[in-house]
């Protein structure tokens, strides 16, 4: 077997000298950056370096390992700032909230270089994708401000419904517990946290297990741009921090991008789970369906980016590929070749395949391959499954039995099962039986077959991609899923709706003068006709 990767591919070249280790010791509660003197969690990169001939992960620094008490203190601060909806932030005018948000975006942009560098070091996102994650997040936040203005303008209108005058706006829900994922530690977290804040909620935010240090350059911006208690940031383990916060019963919204096991456990800890609004982006098993009349070169190109970009660690990644019997052999040959042309290495030089951040992930990928092989599969591409340090070269498995873990579970990594079909019914039966329902990709050049598949899929998943891989963007489009894949919808506009509830002021026609006097006298921020430009 020719080796795609060698040990040196996952080793640090001294010329990529790191910033000094970051020993971060503060956390943000009630507008104060508090210094932690207790236990800390060491932060290591997935990248290895040779120390005295022994390969070791590069030490990046440390972060506070806060305890239950600090988590609950953060919750108290968020509750106080919300004050049952009567706090300064939930009752602030739209322009005050916008000003805070715009100031935050400006401060965030100043930290771009360091955050991008840490995205590469901590989670091995390749350089161009790390830059994209940062830029996309800033654009998302700017668009969020524009959408918020639009929502506010809509809410300045007075409706007259059968003699009842009503002003309808979207109001905040309360205290949000925000938990982000390691694969998009900046983008996916900020795209829920900041819309929630803009709508007038307050929050406790705990960064993901990996990608912790990259949040630390932004703490000062959170502190200076938002009033005390509006955003509280704590570092540590979910079990220690998030569980007691949920058990308190004081969380109104759980915003979690992760998996249903964690969200179910957390919701189960709340004494009144029915009261918790859930905004969840969860696991998926997005299928690619390649029909007999597909343009195979296009399908291969899309499957390579769809299955392997960021090593398959995207919720939208293609995680199972169905290919029609008539084109299976040609597809597999081309897909294997294209996959083996990918370059494995470190993120700094934009390698396609980079070290995996999660401890034990290489072994987990090997276990998927081994089980499938024991049950009759082969690794189709020559370089599939090669390892070097924490790099695992993408492995294409075929034929894959339906009783394997790689068929049933979300692998969230660089292994992809391929299944041959003759009758589309076989594919549809699998999709119907699946626990997941985020997106699907269909490859065909025939409009009639395409139309048939679209109609069979649209009520099973929430986005059908035609001759293209699955993805979340553009961010103005609704992003959601069925079954265990999501709760609530995200997009620039939908996130603002997900973190708010319609609330209205109403009166009969005979009370028109009263309402007019409230508005004309500028006695209420809610009942105002101010038109934000
Ligand atoms: O991990 C899930 C992300 O929301 C996927 O976003 O399709 O832009 O990579 P993406």
Image: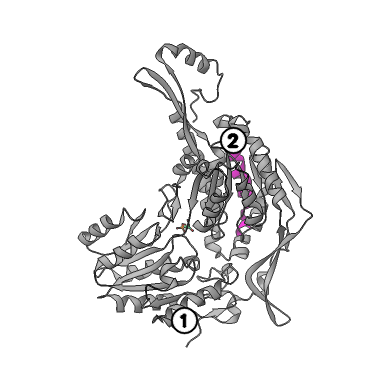
Structure colour scheme: one colour
Check residue 191 for magenta coloring: no
Q: Residue 36: x and y, percent?
A: 76, 52
Tell me if 178 is positioned left or right of 156 in this view.
right
Q: Nearer the viewer, residue 1 or 341?
A: 1
Residue at image position (57%, 37%) is 174
For label 1, the residue is 383
**Which of the marked residues, 1 or 2, is nearer the chain's N terminus?**
2
Separation (CA) of disc 1 from disc 2: 53 Å
Q: Is residue 205 above or below residue 527?
A: below
SS at badge 1: loop
Segment colored magenta: 100-116
Q: Nearer the viewer, residue 319 or 485?
A: 485
State the image coordinates of residue 41 (x, y, percent, origin top left).
71, 61
Q: Quadrant of residue 395?
A: bottom left
Question: In screen coordinates, is 27 left or right of 496?
Answer: right
Farthest residue, direction front: 271
115 in magenta: yes
Placement of 270 over or under 238, stated as above or below: above
Judge whether residue 138 can be spotted in this image.
no
Label 2 packing within 10 angstroms: few (<14), some (14-19), many (20+) = some
Residue that mark 2 sits on:
99
């Amino acid at each position: 077997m020719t080796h795609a990767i060698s040990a040196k591919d996952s080793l640090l070249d001294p010329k990529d000298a790191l910033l000094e280790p970051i020993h971060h010791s503060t956390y943000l509660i009630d507008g104060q950056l508090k210094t932690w003197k207790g236990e800390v969690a060491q932060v290591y990169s997935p990248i290895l370096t040779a120390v005295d001939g022994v390969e070791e992960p590069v030490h990046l620094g440390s972060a506070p390992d806060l305890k239950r008490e600090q988590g609950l203190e953060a919750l108290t601060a968020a509750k106080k700032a919300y004050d049952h909806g009567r706090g300064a932030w939930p009752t602030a005018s739209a322009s005050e909230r916008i000003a805070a948000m715009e100031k935050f975006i400006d401060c965030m942009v100043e930290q771009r270089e360091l955050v991008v560098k840490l995205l590469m070091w901590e989670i091995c996102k390749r350089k161009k994708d790390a830059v994209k994650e940062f830029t996309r997040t800033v654009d998302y936040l700017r668009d969020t401000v524009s959408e918020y203005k639009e929502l506010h303008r809509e809410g300045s209108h007075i409706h007259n419904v059968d003699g009842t005058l009503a002003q309808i706006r979207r109001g905040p829900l309360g205290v949000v517990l925000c938990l982000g994922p390691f694969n998009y530690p900046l983008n996916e977290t900020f795209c829920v946290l900041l819309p929630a804040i803009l709508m007038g909620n307050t929050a406790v935010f705990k960064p993901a297990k990996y990608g912790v240090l990259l949040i630390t350059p932004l703490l000062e911006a959170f502190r200076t741009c938002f009033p005390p208690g509006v955003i509280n940031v704590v570092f540590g383990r979910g079990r220690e921090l998030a569980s007691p916060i949920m058990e308190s019963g004081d969380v109104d919204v759980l915003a979690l991008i992760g998996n249903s096991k964690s969200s179910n456990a957390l919701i189960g800890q709340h004494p009144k789970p029915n009261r918790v609004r859930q905004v969840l982006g969860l696991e998926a098993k997005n299928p690619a369906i390649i029909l007999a009349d597909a343009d195979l070169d296009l399908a291969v190109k899309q499957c390579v980016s769809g299955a392997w970009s960021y090593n398959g660690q995207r919720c939208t990644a293609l995680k199972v590929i169905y290919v029609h019997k008539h084109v299976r052999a040609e597809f597999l040959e081309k897909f294997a070749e294209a996959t083996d042309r990918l370059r494995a290495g470190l993120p700094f030089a934009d390698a396609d395949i980079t070290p995996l951040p999660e401890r034990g992930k290489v072994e987990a990928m090997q276990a998927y391959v081994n089980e499938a092989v024991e049950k009759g599969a082969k690794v189709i591409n020559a370089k599939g499954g090669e390892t070097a340090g924490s790099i695992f070269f993408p492995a294409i498995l075929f034929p894959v039995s339906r009783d394997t873990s790689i068929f049933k579970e979300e692998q969230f990594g660089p292994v992809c099962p391929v299944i041959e079909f003759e009758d589309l019914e076989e594919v549809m039966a699998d999709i119907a039986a699946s626990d997941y329902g985020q997106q699907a990709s269909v490859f065909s050049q025939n409009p009639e077959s395409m139309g048939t598949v679209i109609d069979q899929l649209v009520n099973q998943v929430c986005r059908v991609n035609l001759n293209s891989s699955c993805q979340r963007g553009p961010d103005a489009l609704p992003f959601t899923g069925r079954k265990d894949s999501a709760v609530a919808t995200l997009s620039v506009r939908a996130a603002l709706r997900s973190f708010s509830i319609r609330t209205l002021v109403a009166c009969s026609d005979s009370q028109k003068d009263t309402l007019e006097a409230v508005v004309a006298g500028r006695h209420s921020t809610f009942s105002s006709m101010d038109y934000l430009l």
